[in-house]
Image (cartoon, rainbow, N blue to C red):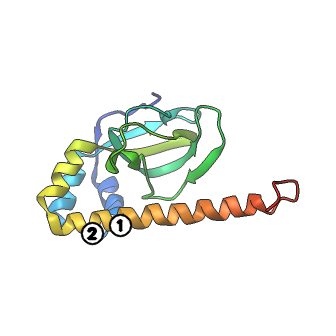
Amino acid sequence: MGSTAANQPVNGGYAMRLKQADLFWGLSPNLLKAIMDVATRHAFAAGTFVYQRDDPADFLYILMQGEVRLRFGDEGTVVFTIATLGEVFGWSSLIGRDRHTLSAFCSQPATVLKFERRRLTALIEKDPDSGVIFYRQLSQALGNRLLQIYDTVAECGDDPSGPAR
């Protein structure tokens, strides 16, 4: 799509930052190492897409640097901005969806880690205790994102020109 460093292995610096990502906090060291071994690093230029709405949801992504805006389609409304180290996006791949519901647009240069769904799922299934932690962390991240979106919608609802309640 716009990736300039596809299929680069995760080096020590990125591996260390990956350990700090909320999604991986508390996983067994063996699982964390196996996950790092299957991750690939990708750099995207500003103005490019990591993925677009309706693309196959085959990968999970973690932001390592930059900013990615999730929006409806190519030109649609921004729903959420990913701008913090370790933030997860593309999670449709892990919740049984075949296609992305939003587009992931790089509003500035971004570096992400990319995880293929089948490989990641297979690793997690081999370590059920860590798998419970992983999916709990994923649920918490999704819940937090949903609450932030609720706050944004509520702020929009305060607009006096909006629909009456």
Residue 97 appears left or right of 128: right
Q: x, y (%) of residue 122?
A: 16, 49
Which residue is at the far front?
Answer: 165
Q: Which residue is mark 2?
A: 133
Residue 21 seen in render: no
Label 1 to label 2: alpha-carbon separation: 6 Å
The residue lying furthest to the right in this view is 161
| Side of 49 relative to 124 (left or right) | right
Mark 2 residue crowding within 10 angstroms, few (<14) / some (14–19) / many (20+): some
At 36% across and 38% down in the image, what residue appears? 98
Q: Secondary structure at mark 2?
A: helix
Label 1 environment density (alpha carbons within 10 Å; few <14, some 14–19, many ≥20): some
- Quarter residue 38 falls in: top left
Q: Position of residue 147 (x, y in %)?
A: 56, 66
Outermost residue to the top: 1
Q: Position of residue 42 (x, y in %)?
A: 39, 39
Rendered residue at 40%/36% (across/down) = 99
x 47%, y 29%: residue: 2
Q: Which residue is mark 1?
A: 137
